[in-house]
Image (cartoon, helix red, strand yellow):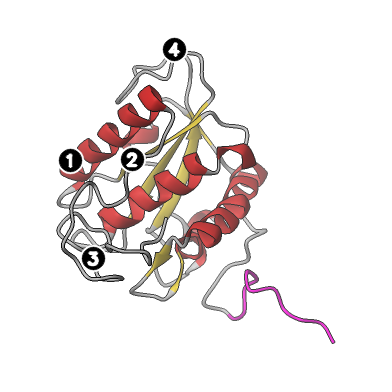
């Protein structure tokens, strides 16, 4: 008996991971402007890898109860999810200079402008892609939240700080941001769950 893959499209609500459907994903935003946006097979290949990395690191959208990578396939939210672009070496760099590194830019568009999980999901994505960098061809994956989110400037400043610390030390920042006092599995003021159950 064939066992269906947990990552296949199980009904009309989701596109398939092997399909590039422009109508089901957000338009590239300002962070990807003037860079080489991934489309077609290139987008599909990196996003297929992303689902495994997010699954391994527990990057899940708690509202919908699925791996964040699946948001790209959810036809109910055609303007939400991730878009990617290879950073051009001669580009005006937003954030820490990556030097001669191979860099991918990843821009997250939440489902709403007030999505309370945006900080957690963006930082979790950064940790998954860069903490498992041996699984892909990039030396650095920069992550930003699209400007449609009402706190995008604050979140993106925190992501720049994550980047700077990662480039300087080669280690990923503490997912709890040094904050404490929360309950396991419950987001604290920094947007992370304290304790051994903390994902990412």
Q: Position of residue 146 (x, y in %)?
A: 29, 46
Q: Position of residue 49 (x, y in %)?
A: 61, 51
Crowd class of label 2 (few under 14; some 14 to 19; many from 20; radius 10 Å): some
Q: Earlier in the sequence, mark 1 or mark 3?
A: 1
> What element does badge 3 sit on?
loop
Q: Is residue 6 magenta?
A: yes
Q: Which residues are magenta?
A: 1-11
* Mark number displayed over residue 153: 1
> Quick check: 178 left or right of 82?
left
> Quick check: 199 left or right of 146?
right
**Residue highlighted by disc 4:** 90
* Mark number displayed over residue 187: 3
Q: Earlier in the sequence, mark 4 or mark 2?
A: 4
Q: Residue 173: name its quadrant.
A: top left
Q: Earlier in the sequence, mark 4 or mark 3?
A: 4
- Answer whether labels 4 and 1 touch (C-beta < 8 Å): no
């Amino acid at each position: 008996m064939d066992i269906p893959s947990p990552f296949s499209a199980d009904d009309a609500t989701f596109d398939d991971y092997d399909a590039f459907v422009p109508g089901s994903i957000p338009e590239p935003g300002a962070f990807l402007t003037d860079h080489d946006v991934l489309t077609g097979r290139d987008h599909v290949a990196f996003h297929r890898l992303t689902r495994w990395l997010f699954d391994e690191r527990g990057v899940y959208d708690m509202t919908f109860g699925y791996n964040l990578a699946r948001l790209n396939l959810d036809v109910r939210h055609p303007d939400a999810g991730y878009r990617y672009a290879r950073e051009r070496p001669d580009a005006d760099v937003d954030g820490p200079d990556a030097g001669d590194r191979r860099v991918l830019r990843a821009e997250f568009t939440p489902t709403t402008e007030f999505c309370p999980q945006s900080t957690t999901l963006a930082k979790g994505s950064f940790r998954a892609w860069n903490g498992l960098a041996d699984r892909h061809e990039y030396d650095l994956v920069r992550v930003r939240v699209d400007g449609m989110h009402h706190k995008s400037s604050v979140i993106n400043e925190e992501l720049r700080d994550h980047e700077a610390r990662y480039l300087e030390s080669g280690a990923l920042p503490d997912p709890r941001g040094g904050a404490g006092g929360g309950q396991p599995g419950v987001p604290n003021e920094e947007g992370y769950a304290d304790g051994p159950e903390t994902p990412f």
